[in-house]
Image (spheres, rainbow, N blue to C red):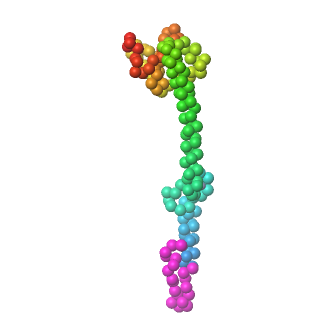
Amino acid sequence: MTPLAVHLFLCYNCLHNFEIKFFIIVQHKTFFMKLSNNRFCLNCGLPVYGRADKKYCDDHCRNDFHNNRAVHNSRLTRLTHKKLRRNYEILSGVMQAGVSEIPKDELLVYGFQIKSVTESELREDGTMIYGIYDIHYFEKPNRLIEVYRKSDVPSYW
Ligand SMILES: [Zn+2]
């Protein structure tokens, strides 16, 4: 109830108390204003009443909305992260085996995803260098992939 509604309005003629009538008018104006806002909860779609910048019915809807968005975003990135992790594991395995060159087809058999890299760079000699975190690789003309740590750039460069 608004503070205005507790005021007493007395008719000087009949001494009738208008407090209740005034309260109804205030409520009616508020109700009309709420209906004309045309705002709906971003979570459940029900009409939103109250402050002009209010976006959700209540705290429950606000939390629900943000949680759902976080879940959606993590679904989008999870698959990419999974591919990058797998690629990194494969290249790490190659390096741990003490090998610096591996046939491209062998990488593909292990499940290597060519398009999933964290960086790429075109060298002046036309060689495309790909990187997955700190491991870099490039393809040689004979379909061999040379793998090296970013810190250990091949000596002939
Ligand atoms: Zn809602």
Q: Is any part of residue 111 visible from this angle?
A: yes
* Residue at the (49%, 14%) spot, across then down: 98
Q: Is residue 87 above or below residue 55?
A: above
- Please tell me which residue lies in front, 128 or 38: 128
Q: Which quarter of the picture shows residue 32?
A: bottom right
The reply to whether the magenta stretch includes residue 5 is yes
Q: Where does the image place residue 129, in percent across and percent down from the top left?
A: 45, 19
Q: Is residue 119 above or below residue 44?
A: above
- Please tell me which residue lies in front, 97 or 156: 97
Q: Is any part of residue 36 visible from this angle?
A: no
* Residue furthest top as drawn: 142
Q: Is residue 121 above or below residue 23?
A: above
* Residue at the (58%, 32%) spot, across then down: 79
- Please tell me which residue lies in front, 141 or 40: 141
Q: Where does the image place residue 49, in percent across and percent down from the top left?
A: 56, 61
Q: Where does the image place residue 61, in percent across and percent down from the top left?
A: 58, 54
Which image quarter is the C terminus in? top left
* Residue furthest bottom as drawn: 13
Q: How many marks?
A: 0
Looking at the rendering, the quadrant in which ligand 1 lies is bottom right
Q: Is residue 114 above or below residue 53?
A: above
Q: Which quarter of the picture shows residue 47?
A: bottom right
Report the span colored magenta.
Answer: 1-20
Q: Which quarter of the picture shows residue 74?
A: top right
* Residue at the (54%, 78%) spot, across then down: 22
Q: Where does the image place residue 153, in percent across and percent down from the top left?
A: 40, 17
* Residue at the (50%, 80%) spot, across then down: 7
Instruction: Report the magenta stretch's main SS.
Output: loop
The reply to whether the magenta stretch includes residue 144 is no
- Please tell me which residue lies in front, 38 or 137: 137
